Structure formats: structure tokens, C-alpha cells
Image (spheres, rainbow, N blue to C red):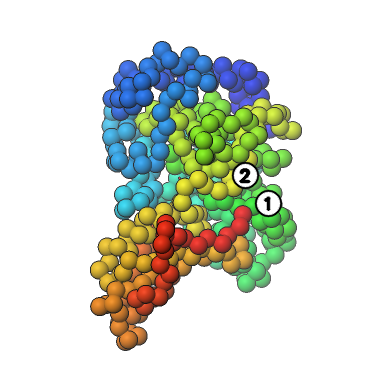
Amino acid sequence: MMWNPRIETMPLDKIKEMQRVQLIKLVNNLYSFNKFYHDRMRAANVTPLDIQSLDDITKLPFMVKQDLRDNYPDKMFTVDKSEIVRYHMSSGTSGKPTCVAYTRNDLDYWTEALARSLTAAGLTSDDTIQIAYGYGLFTGGLGLHYGAEKIGATVLPASTGNTQRQLEMMQDLQCTAIACTPSYLTHLITTARQMGIDWKRDMKLRRCILGAEPWSESMRAKFEAETGAKCIDIYGTSEQAGPMFCECEHQHGPHISPDIMYCEILDPDTGESLEPGNKGELVCTMLKKEAMPMIRYKMKDITSINEEPCECGRTSPRLSRITGRSDDMLIIRGINVFPSQIEYTLMRIPQVGDQYMIKVSREGDLDRMIIQVEIKPESFSDKLEDMQRLRAHIESELKKYLNIAVPVELKAPGELPRFEGKAKRIIDTRVF
Ligand code: DLL
């Protein structure tokens, strides 16, 4: 089944022509009517006349997350406030979040992309999907919600947390699909075992829609063996809109919607464009976004594009599994964490010294992060109580800024290693 066969099976040359026309329209509009983009293009010495072919896109300047932070909250919006119907926000560095705005059409295209994606994943109006991504400022819950409703599936907006109840609801309502992070599925599996639930005997689950963080083929094999459900990768970022592109039932990487997004893959070292099939940094141009267009936005995710037609009959290109990032952003159990956020939070606590270390590992299939923090000599005390109080204070400050509970280990002055060259403050031993 396809949601939009005309787009999903369009021959590649027609796809590229459609993207070319849309790109020219987008660039003309932004150059003529928006100061931010006009100034950017002028600074890069480009005018709309320079953009005639898809390859000409390389003349346009890149955009990066820092642009969103520098222009927080609304300096990059390109429509009147009255046209904005929703905001989503994500945490940023140095305590500054990023804010993404949507017009009615932006929400409609996002929903359309998800309707195509969920259909490709094998869902229909007969399914009941439990959405266990966070509802609220995070894009996961609401994004999947409207996509699933669009195809007529029954939605259980469970959001995150309350794991026993999630499992009971899944059984009671005979949910046939769940959308959540791979980390949360791991937790659900462990809890189900403790509750004596046998997924294959007691559940009707046939699809798990997993994304928002890296996961692997070996995790897929384990999840499928335990739950009996097909596990489908879903990719998206808040800058694009939110969760967007799912694998089809052949599970060879998420199919993108080429009328909505144009992808480039760049060599992270040289910045050169790479041909399909080669791994590099993903750069996306959202061809239809109104409230907050994204042109040549550097996602910082490492992947490749596959333009070969798929066994499912779709011609829409696929992304390969995301194998890492070209920046230092960590994703801990589905939550994006920037080391600079951690540093910013720690350095505002007067008792904290200059040295800290972030340790990330995997226990079973779950991420574990610990932050070791050196205390200033004058703040260090032999009294256990004082140190426990200080540790609790640091942990609560970190929770406030990172949105995730992170255990802290206090270290005596001089205990952590010093670096002669560039400090190496992150030790990440996870393998995906
Ligand atoms: O994580 C949107 C989303 C929600 C995607 C639900 C899928 C499901 P952000 O919080 O902006 O948006 O984080 C985006 O998460 O740049 C990747 O590094 C990572 N990511 C997202 N999906 C995948 C995936 C949402 N399937 C960042 N595999 C991206 C690996 C993923 N990494």
C-alpha cells in the first residue's frame, strides 16, 4: 500500500525536475521577501539568477544549529505571526533553546510525510498505535499523532513514562503498533519480563516505529525476536519538522519524501558533495516550509543516500542507518545533550572547579551517562553530608537544563586528569 503513489513512484528524473522547480521558487521568494535570507545570499554573492539547476544549490550558504540559537526565538521566521499555528522547542547549548515555528501548511506537509511513512511501514486504518514518544515541546508525540490519525489508525497518545501502565494499556486495547525510542522499547521489554508478560502470547503488536536516537541491526534482531513485531526505523529532526521518514517493510533505510526535502551528502572533511551510496554529512533543504525555511541545513548526521528503486516499488530515495554525528551532540536515551550545555551548567555552580569528565556507556541496550566533577579546594569537605548535599544540587541543576537525570560523581581537587593539548572531556564507549 502507498499513501501517495504519484509522488512515491515518480521516476527519478521527474523527481529531480520537481525539486529544481521548487528550489527556484523557494530561493526567489526568500530573496525577495525576507531580510534574513536576502542578506545571507548577498553575503555569499548569490542571487536567484544563479540558481537554475539542482546542482546550483551548492552556491547557497549553509545553515547550522547556531543560526537558530543566534536568532532565537523568532528572528528566522519568515511569515507574519498570525500565520504561525504551532511552536516546538528543543534544548540548546549555553542554556539557549531553539524554537521551530509551523504554519498550517507546514503542519499539513509534516502530516502528509508521516502518512506516507506509516503506510510504508505497513500501518493501516485497522491498526491501533500507542504513541510513547514525548508529547509537548518535543516533536515526537504530536508529529506521529497527526500522521497516524491521518491514515485512520486508532491512536493511543500514551506519551512517555508510567511503564507498567503502558504495558497494561497495550494489552487491554490490543495495540498493534508502538512508536517510541529504541531505549524505551528496551525498558518496556525488561518491565514486561518482570510482569510475566510474553509479548508473542499476550500482545497483538506487529510494528515498532523506532527512532530519535541511533540504534543498530543487532538491536533490531533482538527487539524482533522478543516482541514478534517488525521494527521500523524512523528519522527526522526538529529543524525539518520532527519525525518524518520511515522505512518500508523491506527495512532498507527510511524513504524520504522528495517533494518535501532535498538531500545532499557532503564529505565532512572537505565539504565536497558525494555521489549516492557514499557516506557523509547530511545536508537538507526543506522545499516547502513556510514559517521557518531551512536551506542547506547541516543536520550533522552521518549517512548516505540510496537512489536505487526499492523492492516495495517506491522510487523515493532512502537514507542509510545514521551511524554517528559530525559534531559532539550526544543522544542519551533519546534526549539530545550538548557537552557545552553540561559545561555551561557546571561552570555556573560556584563550588565546581575547572575539571569535569562526561562518561557515556551502554548497559545492556541502555545508555548510561555519568558526570565526574572536580570540586574547588575551598569547597571540598570531609563531611559526607556536605558532599551529598552538593552532589544533589549539581544533579538537580543538570536535570533542569538537560531534561535528563544524570548521576554525578564528585572528585577531590586534582583527582581528574589534566590535558596538555585539547581537553578530552567525553569518553563514549557505546558502539552502534
Ligand atoms: O528526534 C525527531 C524524531 C522524533 C525522530 C521521533 C524520530 C522519532 P531532534 O530532537 O531534533 O528530533 O533530534 C534529531 O536525532 O539529528 C539524529 O542525530 C537523531 N535521530 C533522529 N532519528 C534517528 C534515527 C527528533 N532513526 C536528531 N537514527 C537527529 C539515528 C536519529 N539517529
The residue depicted at 36 percent of the width and 24 percent of the height is 44
For residue 5, above or below residue 107: above
Instruction: Give, as a three-letter code, the residue at label 1.
Output: Glu
The yes-or-no answer for disc 2 within 8 Å of ligand 1 is yes
For residue 196, above or below residue 216: below
Q: Are marks 2 and 1 in contact (CB under 8 Å)?
A: yes
Q: Which residue is mark 1?
A: 217
Q: Position of residue 47 (x, y in %)?
A: 37, 17
Residue 119 visible in the current orientation: no
The 10 Å Cα crowd at callout 2, few under 14, some 14 to 19, many 20 or more, is: many
The 10 Å Cα crowd at callout 1, few under 14, some 14 to 19, many 20 or more, is: few
Instruction: Give, as a three-letter code, the residue at label 2.
Output: Arg
Q: Position of residue 40 (x, y in %)?
A: 33, 27
For residue 32, above or below residue 235: above
The residue depicted at 44 percent of the width and 34 percent of the height is 297
Residue nearer the viewer, 83 or 222? 222
Q: Which residue is mark 2?
A: 321
Side of 263 relative to 296 (left or right): right
Side of 423 relative to 316 (left or right): left
CA gap, disc 2 and disc 1: 9 Å
Helix, strand or loop at disc 2? loop
Q: Quadrant of the C terminus?
A: bottom right
Residue nearer the viewer, 126 or 18? 18
